[in-house]
Amino acid sequence: MRTLVAWPDSQALAGGLAAALGCETLALETRRFPDEELYLCVTGDARDRHAVVVASLDRPDLKFPGLLFLADLLRHEGALSVGLAAPYLAYLRQDTQFQPGEAVTSRTFARMISGSFDWLITVDPHLHRYQSLGEIYSIPNRVLHAAPAVADWIGCNAPAPVLIGPDSESAQWVSDIASRIGAPWLTLEKKRHGDRSVEVSIPNPARLTGRTPVLVDDILSSGRTMIAAARRLVALGHHEITCIGVHAILAGDARAAMHDAGIHRIVTCNTIADPTNQIDLTADLAAAVNAMPPNRA
Ligand code: R5P
């Protein structure tokens, strides 16, 4: 029998997943002691259950090591296995030493998650220099892609679109989405000068003529990538700019700054709970949880 337990900010998604899977849930209480150490307590029966922790890993430093404590707690309470459904997976950016002395946090993070959980499901992880999660995660894992759901949303909500990926890396998902709806697509040329300093250029602006621009990226973080792209589009006379991101990190002033730059609608998937969530991946995640092996391989 399976039971779900949600990290507090993933409760909405976990509720939908439990309903789709027809399974029980455990309640999780978390709070901080005065010295900021974490207190965790689960209520409900984990004994002889296959537990699934639902936790999106945005703002990971606030949730870690709590997730490791939770996996350990569930085993102590008698769970037969503990899987992790993390629709957004953190710590993939630092996938090499760009400068001597830098920590390759992706590897360390993967090792710690693999040591505590029996399997991992995520959506469109930011794989750049790694070809697959299996290079750093030693547990069974499944990667879902938001492209079919994003394509459906665009098909229903954005007439005559031209899909625009902000950099060459985005070609993989922008081309996939575009081919599903028969829309033209292009990628921009991007130079990142710093965390919040991005420059983009549009190689062939004529391809946008007569079309409504839809910017598509995997992660909306500081929003600076999308802001730089939107400014180019506004300069070309486009005023109906939709921006779609799979994962709505939207750190700091990202949301307001994106609107100020001329983006009139921001749409995201429900991998990170946010008011911009309009694309629901619950059914895909439920099917993936159903397909995971219950025990460690
Ligand atoms: C980078 O390669 C990613 O695909 C995104 O373009 C990036 O994470 C967006 O970051 P920001 O919103 O901070 O520009």
Image (tube, helix red, strand yellow):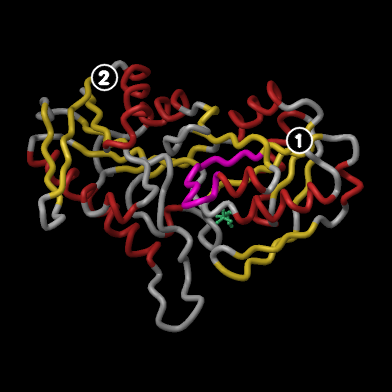
Among numbered discs 2 and 1, the one appearing first in the sequence: 2
Asked if the magenta segment contains residue 252, the reply would be yes
* Mark 2 secondary-structure assignment: loop
Q: Is mark 2 within 8 Å of ligand 1?
A: no
* Residue position for label 2: 23
Q: Which residue is drawn at the image coordinates 69% and 52% (left, top)?
A: 166
Q: How many marks?
A: 2
- Circle 1: is it few (<14), some (14-19), or many (20+) Cα within 10 Å? some
Q: Position of residue 180 (x, y in %)?
A: 71, 30
- Circle 2: is it few (<14), some (14-19), or many (20+) Cα within 10 Å? few
Q: Is mark 1 within 8 Å of ligand 1?
A: no
* Residue position for label 1: 240
Q: Position of residue 41 (x, y in %)?
A: 11, 38
The amino acid on which the numbered mark 2 sits, given as a three-letter code, is: Cys
Q: Position of residue 15 (x, y in %)?
A: 32, 23
Where are the magenta residues, as a range?
243-255
Q: Which residue is drawn at the image coordinates 46% and 66% (left, top)?
A: 94
Q: Which residue is drawn at the image coordinates 59% and 34% (left, top)?
A: 267
Q: Say which quarter of the image contains residue 183.
A: top right
Asked if the magenta segment contains residue 210, the reply would be no
Quick one: 262 or 108, which is closer to the camera?
A: 262
* Mark 1 secondary-structure assignment: loop
Is residue 167 depicted above or below 143 in this figure? Answer: below
Q: Which residue is drawn at the image coordinates 26% and 19% (left, top)?
A: 23
